[in-house]
Image (tube, coloured by chain):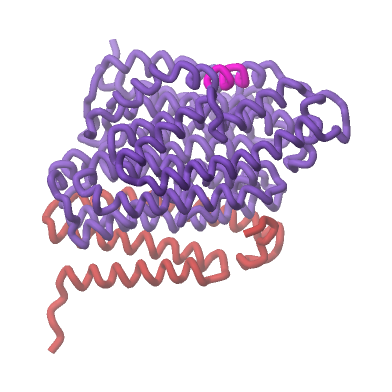
Amino acid sequence: MMPPHLWYLAPELWVAGLAALILLVDLACKGKGSREIPLGAAIALLPVAPILLLQVNLGTRTLLGGMYRLDPLALFFKVIFVAAGILVLVMTREFSRTLERAHAEFTALILLALLGMLLAASSASFLMLFVALELITISFYVMTAYLKTDARSLEAGLKYLILGSIASGLFLYGIAWVYGAAGTTSFAGLRQALAGRTTLSPGLALGLLLIVSGITFKAACVPLHLWVPDVYEGAPTPVTAFLSVGSKSAGFVAALRVLHELFLPASNQWAGLIAWLAGLTILYGNLCAIPQKNIKRLMGYSSIGHAGYILIGVAAASSLGSAATSFYLAGYLVSNLTIFLVISAFWQAVGSDEMADYAGLSRRSPFLAAAMFVALLSLAGVPPMVGFFGKFLLLLSAIQEGFLWVAIVGAAAVVISLYYYLLLVATMYADPPKDPTPIPVSLPVRLALYACLAGILGIGIFQEPCVRLSLAAVRSFF
Amino acid sequence: MIPPVGPSHYLVLSGLLFAIGLAGAASRRNIIMILLSLELILSAANLAFVTFSKILGNLEGQIMVFFVMIVAAAEVAVGLAIAVVMVRRTGKSDADSFRNLKW
């Protein structure tokens, strides 16, 4: 019989054990047959899904000396992270020919980043949150610079490392000031200390400002968004995919924990600032995406735009806003990973990320083109895809809380995003292919794409269960 | 007459260290100097943690510092590794020479 504490930690232990096992197995096999390791890890991650479902009945509990907490919000985000991890591992197998060496280490790094995300979702103190976010970021530094012979990958890794470390420094200095002003780093203690405080003392305000700027780096929002296009373009494709979904979700779960759980009483002090950041981020991401030629760079700017939308929900500081943030991230996961699965399958066959090379994709592989089309419509926010309902909830929460102008900016930016997404669709469907050979799609990628498409259409048409879950996830904050 | 050194002096010092670190990371062109500036930022936070811990009379801040030191070591290890690979490839340790990606 397992001690009850370990059962609460089961997903984290499973992922950490898997990462260690992979390194050991690779050592024993001396790197032979290592190309199938990512797929093996993806299959080995599948049992975490039923574990998470069983944990729903456990209720809220704080463990490990107040460092770790299992609650509905943590579970909701853990499902997102594990799903992202499995899909990214499937993508990594496609990418393994470009990777050339050390597949086991790469897989283990993905799992360690996933472990950091799971811990970030469950953290109940600033110490845990900081260490978990650093575990994610440092794993990503290594993965971004993984292609040692590719100058772009190294450069992306170095830029990410420098800007990421500055952001961690800001975040940490902010924690120091919050600690100094409130006297504790545990969320439970801080919640008590901050209850009923509608104005912030200068120390708390400075701390909160620095913490928020650290989080905007992880979530890829203005003003710390400069790294996004370069890193997205230079990093290996599976890493870009994991950054765009996993790392961003980790940033937003931290935002929800800090702003909605702790600093909610003082929301009139920060909501306006966040709303401004949301508006600027939406406009910046969508306007800069228009002239892009490289599809990963385009997805980088598009991911900045989406971060702006999600920030609207954070600014709203209501249970609807909080739930919409979680719901949108779930929808963003399936839509964005569909696109990255297509990008990695295309890269495997053609070896290019340039948008011009996607010409005639509908004739070379009708399935890939159709999947890309559906996912792009979902990202743009066309009903009945999941992206539409997510945007609808976010804009609704903004209007409810009196941020009408942000809602108008968001609605206008949908039109801009439709323009550049449909430009890519036109290239895929209308232009003649340069090279008409069909593009093969391997079975794991095909299955992963079916799962993502089922998510896009399934959650989009039957939104109610997912909305109910996301509302339940944030109930304890309000 | 010099006033006795109190906690507020340490906070001012930590603020200065933080500002020097930020300015260095933003303006230095040599990768090693940039990494050094990043360490300075983390040290500034550590000093603030220890000072607040002393003022408040609880140990949470000092526990935090241990973890931050480990994280800082991991960060700089990865940073130096990437810097070594880049210098081997290009023969330069100047951040301005890495311009393959549009900034």
Decide which of B22, A418 is in the foreground and name it.
A418
What colour is chain A?
A: purple
Q: The C terminus of chain B is located in which quarter?
A: bottom right
Left or right: where B48 falls relative to A445: left
Residue A211 on the magenta segment: no
Q: The N terminus of chain B is located in which quarter?
A: bottom left
Residue at image point 57% right, 35% down: A380
What colour is chain B?
A: red
Decide which of A315, B94 is in the foreground and name it.
A315
Q: Which residues are magenta?
A: A448-455
Left or right: where A131 falls relative to A353: left
Residue A449 on the magenta segment: yes
Residue A246 image point, x, y percent: 48, 35
Residue A61 image point, x, y percent: 22, 25
Residue at image point 48% right, 20% down: A459
To which quarter of the image does residue A445 belong?
top right
Residue A59 image point, x, y percent: 24, 20
Residue occupying the far top of the picture = A1
